[in-house]
Amino acid sequence: MNHPFVRNLLVKQVPWNQRFLQRYTSCFELHRCSIDKFHHQIRCKSDKPTLSSLVVPIEVKVTSNPDDINLGAEITGGKLKKSEIVTIINEILLREHFKLLAQENGIDHTLFQQCFQSFRTFCSNSKVLPTELHIKLYDILHGNGNVDDLFPDFLKHAKQVFPHLECLEELKKISDLTSPVNWYPEARNLNRKIIFHGGPTNSGKTYHALKRFYAAESGVYCAPLKLLAVEVTNKANAAGTKCDLVTGEERFFANEDGTPASHVSCTVEMACTSTPREVAVIDEIQMIKDPQRGWAWTRALLGIPAKEIHLCGEEASLDIIKEILSAIPEEVEVNAYKRLTPLEIENTPLGSLSNVKKGDCIVCFSKKDIFNISLQLEKLGHDIAVIYGSLPPGTKVAQTKKFNDPNDPCNILVATDAIGMGLNLSINRIIFSSLKKPINSEKGGPEIEVIPTSTALQIAGRAGRFNTEYSTGYVTCFNQADLTLLKDLITRPVEPIGAAGLHPTMEQIELFAYHLPKATFSNLFDIFLSICRMDTSCYFMCNVDNIKYLADLIQH
């Protein structure tokens, strides 16, 4: 493998896709602040950039040694002047047939101009031209040839300037994403049983799936957050089921001799698609629609080779799951759950921070709001815990334990929507500081959007969890103006998910790197996305800006 980034990865002893994901996830934690500034919120884009706008031309060096034997001049009996060569080459721009031949070989107008300039520079500045090219130019100059005769030489030169022209059809085959179910032969060789556990937050769906995970001879749990992966690892080992932990940052072996245990709990990006298991649990399956990470849930759903696949999440994801799996085909057994404790919307807003009480969680959508509210609560004499997405994982665990500990004076939590996925927190009341979340627009500018129903339900559902001291959960807003909107959001049905996320596999990018060894890793992604094909009725392309950004960090 000639590509430097790929070659650097291949010296390691674990599969390339896992090696990259380990480095990618680790860097994601280390450079999250930089990524937040760089990252653009994905939108449905109607226009993909053209291939010609992405490929980077490679300079073709002219032959500069005047002592080389000029066979062309010896055969024709005459040398060519630079002005004569330029005059002949310039005629190419006037030849429509020449341009048509170029288009038939994948050279559009943009590439044609660049290839023409490079070809003219090469021909006019080389001390010694290739023999056949010299003869053709000499014949054209003396009326014994046609400018169109230069096309084979022009095409050969163009393929040196733009190497993708040599293997364009092969690249198109590699970037064919129309049938992702065929990417995972180990999973396709099994007659997998799919069990869908659907229901609202705090309905016990993950609990029932994990019971099967603990009892199985082998299993893998795929978590949306490292915090959940750690929690399942600890619970499994405490229950006597030895369970490893695999995240982008670390690997923990339950066996003292360092050999892999029969069970593993991992973040979903780190799920292995080559190791057979008896049971796999994929948590928060509705994240398959996420514009950044949805590909990881699609990969786990289609690729994990387990006899039983347990999917836990919103019922809104059931239709797209059935549609995706219908191509295999694998039938889906559905287990529906209802919330175990009541959830009530209060009729009055919080109004003032002086009205907070034990078990309250104030949810913000920016770190600035978190810091401001935390500071005000501390001035009022409250001991608080804080949880937000970019907080180091160890600190999140410590803050969670602090808030859940009944003997700790901390009984108020301030958090972002990071608490919305599976964290077991002893919350009595959720208080939305706002129902509008700042995002980055497609062009990078700030935008404010009302949170979707699914997000509102996920967060509100954290209140009054089963088996905590609070038998009923409550939810309200800080301001009266948001309360009516909150009631509408929570009572509104969640729209079915229309498509699942995809992005190129590392194996596909590796093949691209083989054909285009001089392209940067980021540029490989751009070229891939410009020519790839996919079934847009079931899938969408996830935003790969973060991966490209981190690839540049690693490469440089």
Image (cartoon, rainbow, N blue to C red):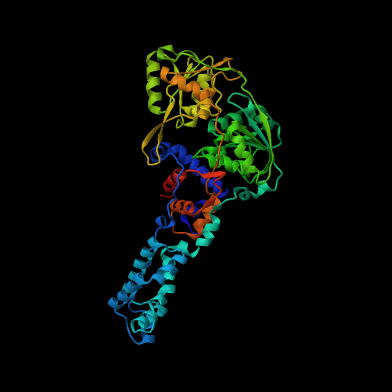
Vertical relation: 378 (above or below) 167: above
Hey, which quadrant is residue 495 in on the image? top right
Vertical relation: 449 (above or below) 101: above
Q: In front: 44, or 27? A: 44
Residue 110 coordinates in the image, percent (x, y):
38, 60
Residue 335 coordinates in the image, percent (x, y):
67, 30
- Tell whether 318 sits left or right of 10: right
Residue sitting at 41 percent across and 12 percent down?
354
Q: Residue 12: tell me if it is visible.
A: no
Q: Total label count? A: 0
Q: In front: 338, or 46? A: 46
Q: In front: 39, or 554? A: 39
* Residue projecting furthest to the left: 83
Q: Residue 199: tell me if it is visible.
A: yes
Residue sitting at 40 percent across and 68 percent down?
99
- Tell whether 415 sits left or right of 61: right
Vertical relation: 455 (above or below) 543: above
Vertical relation: 58 (above or below) 535: below
